[in-house]
Amino acid sequence: MAELRTGTLPEDRQPVIIAARRTPICRSNGALKTLRAHELLAPVLRSLLDDAGVAPGSVADVVIGNAVGGGGNVARLSALEAGLPVSVPGLTVDRQCGSGLDAIVLASRLVAAGGGIGGSVYLAGGVESISTAPLRAHPGSQGDPEFFARAQFAPPGHGDPDMGVAAENVAARYGIARERQDAFALRSHCRALAAAAAGLFDGELVPLAGPNRPVTADDGPRPGLSGAVLARFPPAFAAGGTVTAGNSCFDADGAAAVVITSVQRARELGARDGLLVLGTDTAGVDPQFLGIGAAAAGRRLLDAVGLTGGELGLVEFNEAFAAQALACLDLLAIDPDRANLDGGALALGHAYGASGAVLVTRLLAQARRRGSDGLLALALISIAGGMGTAALLEYRTFP
């Protein structure tokens, strides 16, 4: 169910996001291939503490999403790597692609519940190093490892399609034509390139030390892409299908995180503005059509707070596939041209556990550029196994 309705919480329990940072997002086995998950995330956490003026020892918890890592609580490892004192705990969340957004949701609910002694300041977000993710295997009948490419997300009776096959299912059911998918993908690349050229990502990026040189920018957007080039891509997942490598995201490495606290504590820290968390929801759908999970969560959340898609000022949707992004936006009556103003995962890449936190990082940057009190923003992500998470945010300045 939707939670955290605005107007029902006092300032000492109203969650607000006051800082957000991310690493460059780079193709897996590329510029960040030597950095493990905690090495990606730690510089982001350090930057956030500086940005928000938070003393490391005052952090109540570090809540981090991760999907394909090696376990071992990457949140705790990252916090220690970042130099936080041993007194600060860490919690790792796994809701696959939704992990980063769900970590932020969880931290928001902890603030709303009055958790966290000493001011309720949380670091929350997600990280993924697909390049260094461990190989996975089950013990075979003779004890030999039987390697598998991905985890099982649903039992056989529900169907457990690969992501691309599920995207084809969505495209077919909701009539998302190939031409529309390609146009959406091209727009994503063009917008990301324009945003980078205008310096719109500069304030949120944390440079990293790559194997050969410092990594200071995303490497996914393709300046030479065109509609004619996209039209030449063959179907990638089904004969005669519409989903191609060109209108699908690529796997990426990266990390993103935010500072979440109460409005009262934000004022004490001297924060000038932030994104109030007005409501959140996670919903389940048929795993065969897992790409529409975000629409189910978004619809329930908007209905709960009495809003329509047209009343939203900003929307960020994780573009795992153009087909599912377009289907969800259609179902929510949101004009696709109003979503992902600076491009999305089709251009920047999908760093699984980090992607949901990247959405929130982008929304804070966009809201600050607009500078309009009361601006409503929605973050949306669909999730393997047939789920989706949505978070409704409102930009506020603090007098």
Image (spheres, rainbow, N blue to C red):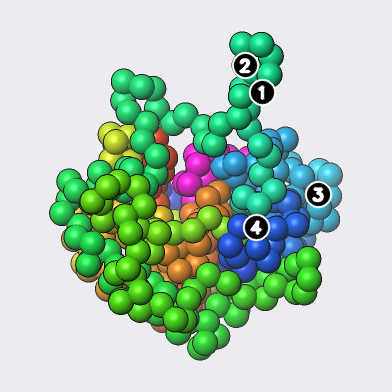
Q: Which residue is mark 2?
A: 140
Instruction: Estimate how packed mark 2 is, as few (under 14), some (14 to 19) or many (20 or more) residues with alpha carbons within 10 Å.
Output: few
Residue that appears at 81% across and 52% down: 81
Name the amino acid type tagged 2: Gly
Tell me residue 271's x, y (percent): 60, 71
Residue that appears at 23% across and 51% down: 240
Q: Which residue is mark 3?
A: 80
Tell me residue 220's x, y (percent): 53, 70
Q: Are marks 4 and 2 in contact (CB under 8 Å)?
A: no
Tell me residue 83's x, y (percent): 83, 55
Above/below status of 252 relative to 97? below
Q: Secondary structure at mark 2?
A: loop
Q: CA distance from mark 3 to mark 4?
A: 26 Å
Is 61 within the magenta? no
Magenta stretch? 91-103
Q: CA distance from mark 4 to mark 2?
A: 29 Å
Tell me residue 55's x, y (percent): 77, 60
Q: Secondary structure at mark 1?
A: strand
Judge by depth and name the residue closer to the eye, 144 or 117. Answer: 144
Q: Which mark is residue 145?
A: 1
